[in-house]
Every structure is written in C-alpha cells, then in structure tokens.
Amino acid sequence: MASSFLSFSLLFISLYTADGFRSYSLASCDFNSTDPKDIELIHSEYFNKLEIYRFSSSLGKFVGYTEYGVKQAEYFNNDPSILAQISAEKERYCVTTVGLDYQAALTKSAEPYVVLHSVTPSGGKHSAMLVCSVFDFYPKNIKVSWLRDGKEVTSDVTSTDELADADWYYQIHSHLEYTPRSGEKISCVVEHASLREPLVTDWDPSMPESERNKIAIGASGLILGLVLSLAGFIYYKRKARGRILVPSN
Ligand SMILES: *[C@@H]1O[C@H](CO)[C@@H](O)[C@H](O)[C@H]1NC(C)=O
C-alpha cells in the first residue's frame, strides 16, 4: 500500500518536473498618433521569461540584456543591412497597422445608453439610492454627474471605474445616496465625446415600465380567465336548463 502510494506520487513528481523551453519574439508598436515620429517599433527576443535583446526604432539600434544578448546586439548593430531591414519594419508593419487602427476604431465614438434605477442602500445615513448605469460607449473618457433640482450633487456620490466590456465598449455605474424630498427632480447627466450635448435622464419615481408591463400582462391574464370562466358558466347553465326541460316536457 505504502509502496504503491510512493510510486503514484513519484509518477506525479516526474510528470510535474518534466520541463521544456520557450524561445519567442515579440514585435509591438507603441503609439499615440498616426504620425511616424509618435510610433515606436519594439522587437524583442525572449528565452523563457527573460528578454535577451530588443530592437527599438526610437533608439535606432539593438540593446542586449544578458551576456549573450549584449553580444548579439553588438553584432547586429555592426551590420548596416540588418539595421536597415529591421528599421524598415516600422514603416511596413507599424505605420500601416496604426493607420488602420485609427481608421477602423480609434477615431470613432459610440453613443451610450443610460438606465436609471433605484436600489436599497446598504446602511448609510440616507434612505434611498439611485444607480445611473451607462452602457456601450467608446472611447473610455466619460463624465457622469447628478443634478438635484438643477444643481449638481457632489456629496454621497460614488462611481465605478470605466469597465471594459472587452469588445471596445465600456460601461460605468454611478451611485447617488439621498434622502427623498417631495416634489424634487433628480437627473443623471452623461457627458461624452459621442454626444453633441449632455445626455440628461430624469428619475421617474413612479413604477418603471418593465414593472408596469408585468402588471398589465398579469391583469390581462386575469380578465381573460374571468371572461372565459363566465362564458363557461353561462354555457353550463344553458345546457343544464335544457336538460331539465326535457323530462318535464
Ligand atoms: C506622443 O508622445 C510623445 C512623448 O512620448 C510626445 O512628445 C508627443 O507629443 C505625443 N503625441 C501626441 C499626439 O500626443
């Protein structure tokens, strides 16, 4: 028993220690505009997790990070044809790709939609809480604020970060804790590059539409049921009367 456990463990240990190596290159383009001078090509060579050497288009040369890497970098830096070849990669790969990124996405914007709803506050000094949820906007920069009777509210407001949906869109949720007053008007204001003017959503303390719909559907079902059972009852009464009439005839 003990020996089979030992060999079982050894099997795992030997499987676990069975190792390999990974050697790879990583080319990246760092940029903040389509202007070639704002674009940097970085081409790195790695062994396992260690960067051995890289070429940077901003430096215009190779840099080594290990003993072997330093030698390689020196060797490449002394070969003008290699330097010319890799420098041309910036134009061929980065400038082209960055141009396409700007064309396809980075100059575009997507308008958000806003959902305003109330939640129960978790403790705190106020009895009510509103959440202004802003969905599907791009780019990331956005301002979400609150108005109470036309004046901006700054206290008791908390917000999430801009959360990436991982499909280029973002969402953000802003919370306002407050003590309701009668006749007041509360609004959530969204300012974003996709909007010509701030998007103002007023809080409607009456029942939300989805709730109204549920009640309307329920009520329709109830009425339909009542009508059908009444029809059935009348039908039954008529039949019953007919049957009673026969023997007395
Ligand atoms: C891009 O960044 C560089 C510095 O890294 C700066 O000099 C340049 O002005 C920036 N360009 C834009 C368009 O922001």
Image: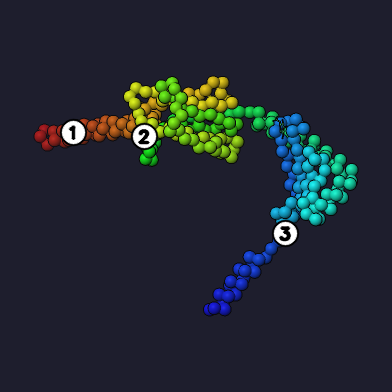
The answer to whether any part of residue 76 appears in the image is yes
Q: Secondary structure at mark 1?
A: helix
**Alpha-carbon distance for marks 2 and 3?**
59 Å
Disc 2 secondary structure class: loop
The kind of residue on which mark 3 rests is Phe
Q: Quick one: quadrant of the C terminus?
A: top left
Nearer to us of marks 2 and 3 is: 2
* Residue marked by disc 3: 21
- Dot 1 surroundings within 10 Å: few (below 14), some, or many (20 or more)? few
Inspect the image, locate mark 2, and give the three-letter code of the amino acid beneath it: His
| Quadrant of the image occupied by residue 217 | top left
Disc 1 residue: CB within 8 Å of ligand 1: no
Q: Which residue is mark 2?
A: 126
Residue at image point 62% right, 71% down: 11
Scheme by which the image is coloured:
rainbow
Mark 1 or 3, nearer chain start: 3
* Residue type highlighted by circle 1: Lys
Residue 106 in the image: state x and y as whole percent: 66, 31
Q: How many marks?
A: 3
Contact, CB < 8 Å: mark 2 with mark 3? Answer: no
> In which quadrant of this rendering is ligand 1 seen?
top right
Mark 2 or mark 1: name the one nearer the start of the chain.
2
Circle on res. 237: 1
| Label 3 C-beta lies within 8 Å of the nearest ligand 1 atom | no
Q: Which type of secondary structure does the marked residue at label 3 adopt?
A: loop
Report the mark closest to the observer, 1 or 3.
3
Residue 17: image location, x then y, percent: 66, 66
Badge 3: few (under 14), some or many (20 or more) residues near its Cα, within 10 Å? few
Observer-side mark, 2 or 1, equals 2
